[in-house]
Image (cartoon, helix red, strand yellow):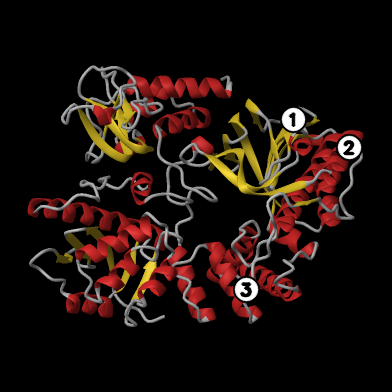
């Protein structure tokens, strides 16, 4: 693709003020404003579009449509009306362009990084917290207000901070190869996928190779289907044979009024699913050895908590993951959406073979680009708006994966080899040393029967707070983290990003378990303020009370100056001798875990002397106790 210098851009739209601001590679800002008495310098904007690749956040859905309209000569009120059309009425960008009969100038080269980042429904401000950006700032002026001359300066400063956050996210996307991979794919297939998610890329590539655009199938709410048991899945024990019978005979139901599951997103909200699992399947609890397993919409999960296992002279701890698990299920069972036809499966198999060849040859970029296509296609099977939509296939894949793992678990346990944990695509075993050869034979036989391949990692130990929150120490003394033990990082999870929350406590626990370092030593010696902070999305905005008032008194009914407003994302650290909390502005309820929290919307250069070290030590001790580790 033609390379241009990168400029980051953002808009602010009010009924008497419009701002289009750019952050250049030189770290300088260029801005174009329109307000009564000053028209928009459209030539200047066009020159920016012709010279730079412009990068924004959610810019494909908002900034580009509004900017396209501004370049036609629309005035402030017209732009505000268009703004409301996109936000209040939820108009799609293509509908917007069609309604106004406009488009972005042909010279525009644009990247929207919102879909590139792997988080789901995460705002720019939340990403600022996750990425430890220096300043988190919410919109300082209500969008319905008029803007005074002095407020133009406030808005410009706010917009500039958003641009710096966007630049930081773009840098992360480049460092993690998400942008370079998309550039590679775009050059390879001749379609610009730089602003697309993994699933959208897979859909675009498949559509291009098919040569036609399949229409999504319709599955009415209440539509039911059952799981088809593959011939290579069977069990030895009555318990699992009965579980298989229930899974094979109990219907799954498509629910367009999306049913809620027990899983939570990064904000603590229930994730919604379009497929309801029958209550008889959801109720299955399979006890094998010391573990209990249950079926889930996303994969198998064991139920352990507060346990730990270490490799000793008598037992070995080993993690065994299935390589390319779901893509192999799709290929082995020859699954393809009916609207796409068998040609889609041929495309999928070809990509899989090419990915394996690239991986073995060390062609990392090519291998990773093929992986995006494979995994992205699976992700689209559950989207009713996608050409790949096939709820039957989605559950066929995930249920098959769970049953296959249960086959392996059953065979191991019947041979005296304990499986101490299981997740979507792997298991952790605690194998008596004399039985290691037997374990290896069982796993090889399982690989042959189900046509899969296991990848193994020996552990020195694994330590569970619960099934979703644990850490392991490999035989090379590296730490593998899950759940609360994962450091906050953009893209730290498969579908969402984890916000920072008292990370020094997790580090202290791991240092104690791994090297015997006392908890307080790790915490008191830390000089990185990012390890002490927490950030959280607060619906309706967060506030700190500046007076002693009724606990649940709504803040929006108080006099100005009685509270400090922080917006929809708040960041804090715990302060010594401070007992107040942060609250929801809408109802006065306390934000979880915020007692003693001192807001840090701008990060200091060093750890403040008021940090409540003892609070962090106490929390680390509580976390260590939950692991039940004894030394």
Q: Nearer the viewer, residue 543 or 304?
A: 543
- Describe the element under mark 2 as helix, strand or loop: helix
Q: Nearer the viewer, residue 465 or 239?
A: 239
Quadrant where the image shows the C terminus: top right
Q: Which residue is mark 3?
A: 206
Q: Residue at x 17, y 60 (%)?
A: 17
Q: Residue at x 48, y 66 (%)?
A: 196
Task: Identify whether 47 is placed above or below 581.
Answer: below
Residue 171 visible here: no
Dot placed on the residue nearer the N-terminal end, 3 or 1 = 3
* C-beta proximity under 8 Å, tags 3 and 1: no
User: Which image quarter: residue 25?
Assistant: bottom left
- Describe the element under mark 1 as helix, strand or loop: strand
- Quick check: 98 left or right of 551? right
Q: Which residue is mark 1?
A: 291
Q: Nearer the viewer, mark 3 or mark 1?
A: 3
Q: Nearer the viewer, residue 430 or 460?
A: 430
Q: Position of residue 555 (x, y in %)?
A: 27, 28
User: Which image quarter: residue 39?
Assistant: bottom left
Q: Position of residue 16 (x, y in %)?
A: 16, 59
Dot placed on the residue nearer the N-terminal end, 2 or 3 = 3
Q: Which residue is mark 2?
A: 242
Mark 2 crowd level (few <14, some 14–19, many ≥20, 10 Å Cα): few
Q: Residue at x 35, y 79 (%)?
A: 3
Dot placed on the residue nearer the N-terminal end, 1 or 2 = 2
């Amino acid at each position: 693709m033609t390379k241009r210098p990168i400029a980051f851009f953002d808009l602010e739209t009010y009924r008497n003020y419009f701002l289009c601001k750019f952050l250049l590679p030189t770290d300088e800002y260029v801005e174009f404003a329109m307000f009564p008495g000053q028209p928009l310098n459209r030539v200047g904007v066009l020159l920016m579009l012709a010279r730079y690749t412009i990068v924004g956040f959610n810019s494909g859905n908002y900034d580009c449509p509004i900017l396209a309209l501004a370049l036609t000569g629309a005035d402030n009120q017209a732009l505000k009306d268009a703004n409301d059309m996109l936000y209040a009425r939820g108009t799609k960008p293509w509908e917007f362009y069609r309604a106004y009969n406009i488009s972005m100038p042909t010279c525009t080269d644009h990247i929207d990084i919102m879909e590139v980042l792997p988080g789901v429904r995460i705002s720019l401000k939340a990403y600022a917290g996750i990425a430890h950006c220096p300043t988190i700032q919410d919109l300082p002026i209500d969008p319905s207000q008029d803007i005074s001359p002095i407020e133009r300066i406030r808005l410009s400063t706010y917009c500039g901070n958003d641009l710096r956050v966007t630049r930081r996210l773009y840098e992360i996307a480049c460092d993690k190869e998400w942008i370079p991979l998309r550039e590679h794919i775009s050059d390879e297939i001749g379609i610009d996928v730089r602003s697309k998610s993994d699933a959208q890329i897979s859909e675009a590539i498949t559509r291009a190779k098919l040569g036609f655009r399949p229409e999504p199938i319709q599955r009415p709410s209440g539509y039911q289907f059952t799981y088809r048991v593959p011939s290579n899945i069977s069990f030895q024990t009555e318990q699992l044979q009965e579980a298989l019978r229930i899974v094979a005979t109990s219907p799954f139901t498509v629910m367009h009024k999306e049913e809620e599951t027990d899983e939570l997103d990064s904000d603590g909200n229930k994730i919604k699913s379009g497929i309801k699992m029958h209550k008889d399947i959801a109720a299955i609890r399979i006890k094998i050895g010391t573990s209990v397993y249950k079926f889930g919409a996303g994969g198998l999960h064991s139920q352990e908590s507060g346990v730990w296992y270490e490799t000793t002279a008598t037992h070995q701890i080993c993690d065994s993951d299935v390589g390319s698990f779901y893509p192999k299920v799709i290929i082995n069972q020859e699954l393809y959406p009916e609207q796409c036809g068998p040609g889609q499966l041929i495309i999928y198999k070809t990509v899989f073979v090419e990915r394996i060849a690239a991986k073995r040859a060390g062609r990392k970029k090519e291998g990773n680009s093929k992986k995006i296509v494979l995994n992205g296609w699976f992700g689209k099977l559950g989207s009713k708006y996608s050409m790949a939509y096939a709820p039957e296939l989605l559950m066929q894949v995930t249920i098959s994966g769970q049953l296959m793992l249960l086959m392996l678990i059953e065979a191991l346990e019947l041979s005296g080899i304990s499986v101490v944990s299981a997740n979507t695509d792997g298991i952790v075993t605690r194998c008596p040393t004399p039985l290691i050869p037997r374990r290896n034979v069982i796993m090889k036989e399982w690989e042959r029967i189900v046509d899969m391949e296991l990848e193994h990692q020996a552990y020195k130990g694994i330590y569970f707070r619960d099934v979703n929150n644990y850490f392991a120490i490999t035989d090379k003394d590296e730490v593998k983290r899950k759940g609360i033990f994962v450091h906050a990082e953009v893209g730290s999870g498969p579908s969402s990003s984890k916000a920072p929350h008292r990370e020094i406590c997790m580090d202290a626990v791991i240092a104690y378990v791994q090297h015997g370092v006392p908890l307080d030593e790790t915490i008191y010696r830390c000089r990185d303020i990012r390890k002490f902070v927490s950030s959280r999305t607060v619906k309706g905005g967060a506030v700190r009370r500046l007076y002693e008032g009724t606990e649940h008194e709504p803040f929006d009914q108080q006099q100005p100056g009685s509270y400090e407003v922080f917006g929809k994302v708040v960041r804090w650290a715990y302060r010594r001798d401070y007992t107040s909390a942060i609250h929801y502005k809408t109802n006065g309820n306390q934000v979880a875990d915020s007692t003693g929290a001192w807001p840090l919307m701008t990060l200091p250069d060093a750890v403040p002397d008021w940090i409540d070290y003892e609070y962090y030590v106490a929390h680390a001790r509580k976390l260590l106790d939950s692991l039940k580790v004894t030394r």
